[in-house]
């Protein structure tokens, strides 16, 4: 069976849904979301830990966060769904003087971009923000109260329901398996397991599988999947729900409370690529548990719920920044890929920006530094060592 759509959005995660919604809001009719799974949110969106922050070390990521924050604050009014944005803060911890210098340098960039509420904390001040934390070996911290938490699946639901009301169609179990191109390299149609869809344009929002989709159009996209793991404790009231996201800059260990459990993470080095089995490794769980016991002593008495521990995939670009814009080798494929762990928090901003590009409007912020051609041009984004 052959159908037609103005724009096919490949990927039913929060970025794809946000783009589809903003396209419909801008007046584009006949937008179709193609989702390969039985339902949306079963990929990276559903595995996200739900952090939101503007404490980045590059102007573009700070700008994306601030735009996303504006939209999160209006989200319930616009979509009817509460995004769960809770301003409990992000606490970045320095274990060396050089790490503290890096946090200070990042704050200078943050304040220049308008994040004036970001502040430095002395070791003695850390306890007022997170009293459960051991401050042994710390040199200081950075904190921003307007950072905090969001609910990824609520944001996805909000965009999906609002998009549906505006006429966006969702095709489930519609994995993209090929494309037909014209003589100029434009995509004429997208072939799924179900049918063939003739299109005017395509948005690649396929997350960790984005490079595979780009390759179908003869386009090289330097995005690779990287596995990340998360451990959950048994239910506990030992830590408050208002505990800020607490991150050790050196190791990347971080912890928060979610739905009455402590959620603990550590981005151990892994080989890029889709793993044979996507699950939390027992040895990793043991290591991250030891780190949690060291840094948050109250967790020593709380058992890890091993069956609840899980793994998911980041979509990572060479400079760990998003790749946004029209594919240089394909005149009607737009990229919204490579957010490198920041896709959910930036999805409200990316949805608006990519939709603006497609309809010919100037985006609210200049995202030219995220252009797909930057790697070939030797213009990869340079950043301080912040996760």
Image (tube, grey):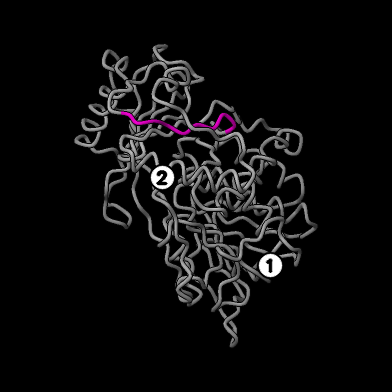
Q: Is 173 included in the stretch rendered in magenta?
A: no
Q: Which residues are magenta?
A: 138-146
Tell me if 16 is positioned left or right of 258 in this view: right
Tell me if 111 is positioned left or right of 161 in this view: left
Task: Work out whether residue 215 can be spotted.
Answer: no
Find residue 320 and report its horizontal and vertical position in percent: 43, 56
Vertical arrangement, residue 138 with respect to residue 177, above or below: above
What's the residue at 60%, 72% (across, down)?
Answer: 189
Find residue 28 and report its horizontal and vertical position in percent: 77, 60
Tell me if 273 is positioned left or right of 2 in this view: left
Crowd around label 2: few <14 · some 14–19 · many ≥20 (10 Å): some
Vertical arrangement, residue 341 with respect to residue 182, above or below: above
| Residue 246, numbered circle | none
Find residue 76 and report its horizontal and vertical position in percent: 71, 33
Q: Earlier in the sequence, mark 1 or mark 2?
A: 1
| Residue 4, numbered circle | 1
Q: Secondary structure at mark 2?
A: helix
Total numbered badges shown on the rendered structure: 2
Q: Quadrant of the N terminus?
A: bottom right
Residue closest to the eye, 344 or 8: 344
| Residue 102, numbered circle | 2
Find residue 250 and report its horizontal and vertical position in percent: 32, 40
Task: Work out whether residue 104 can be spotted.
Answer: yes
Q: Is 143 included in the stretch rendered in magenta?
A: yes
Vertical arrangement, residue 232 with respect to residue 383, above or below: above
What's the residue at 60%, 79% (across, down)?
Answer: 186
């Amino acid at each position: 069976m052959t159908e037609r759509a103005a724009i096919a959005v490949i990927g039913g995660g929060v970025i794809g849904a946000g783009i589809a919604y903003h396209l419909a809001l801008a007046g584009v009719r006949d937008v179709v979301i193609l989702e390969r799974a039985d339902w949306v949110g079963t990929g990276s969106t559903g595995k996200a830990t739900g952090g939101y922050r503007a404490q980045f070390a590059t102007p573009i990521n700070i700008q994306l966060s601030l735009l996303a924050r504006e939209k999160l604050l209006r989200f319930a009014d616009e979509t009817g769904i509460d995004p769960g944005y809770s301003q409990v803060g992000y606490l970045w911890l320095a274990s060396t003087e050089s790490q503290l210098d890096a946090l200070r340098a990042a704050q200078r960039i943050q304040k220049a971009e308008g994040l004036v509420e970001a502040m430095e904390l002395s070791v003695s001040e850390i306890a007022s923000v997170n009293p459960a934390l051991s401050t042994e070996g710390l040199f200081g911290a950075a904190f921003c109260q307007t950072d905090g938490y969001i609910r990824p699946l609520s944001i996805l639901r909000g965009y999906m329901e609002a998009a549906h009301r505006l006429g966006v169609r969702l095709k489930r179990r519609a994995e993209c398996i090929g494309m037909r191109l014209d003589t100029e390299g434009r995509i004429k149609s997208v072939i799924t397991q179900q049918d063939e869809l003739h299109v005017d344009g395509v948005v690649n929002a396929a997350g960790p599988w984005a490079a595979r989709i780009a390759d179908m159009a003869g386009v090289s996209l330097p995005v690779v999947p990287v596995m990340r793991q998360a451990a959950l404790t048994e239910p506990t009231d030992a830590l408050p729900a208002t505990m800020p996201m607490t991150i050790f800059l050196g190791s990347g260990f971080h912890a928060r409370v979610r739905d009455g459990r402590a959620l603990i993470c550590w981005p151990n080095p892994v080989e890029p690529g889709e793993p044979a089995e996507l699950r939390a490794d027992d040895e990793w769980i043991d290591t991250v548990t030891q780190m949690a016991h060291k840094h948050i002593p109250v967790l020593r008495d709380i058992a890890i719920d091993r069956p609840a521990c899980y793994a998911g995939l980041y979509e990572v670009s060479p400079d760990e920044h998003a790749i946004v814009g029209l594919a240089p080798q394909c005149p009607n494929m737009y990229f919204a890929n490579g957010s490198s762990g920041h896709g959910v928090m930036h999805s409200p901003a990316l949805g608006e920006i990519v939709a603006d590009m497609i309809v010919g409007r100037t985006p609210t912020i200049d995202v030219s530094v995220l252009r797909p051609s930057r790697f070939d041009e030797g213009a990869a984004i340079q950043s301080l060592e912040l996760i």
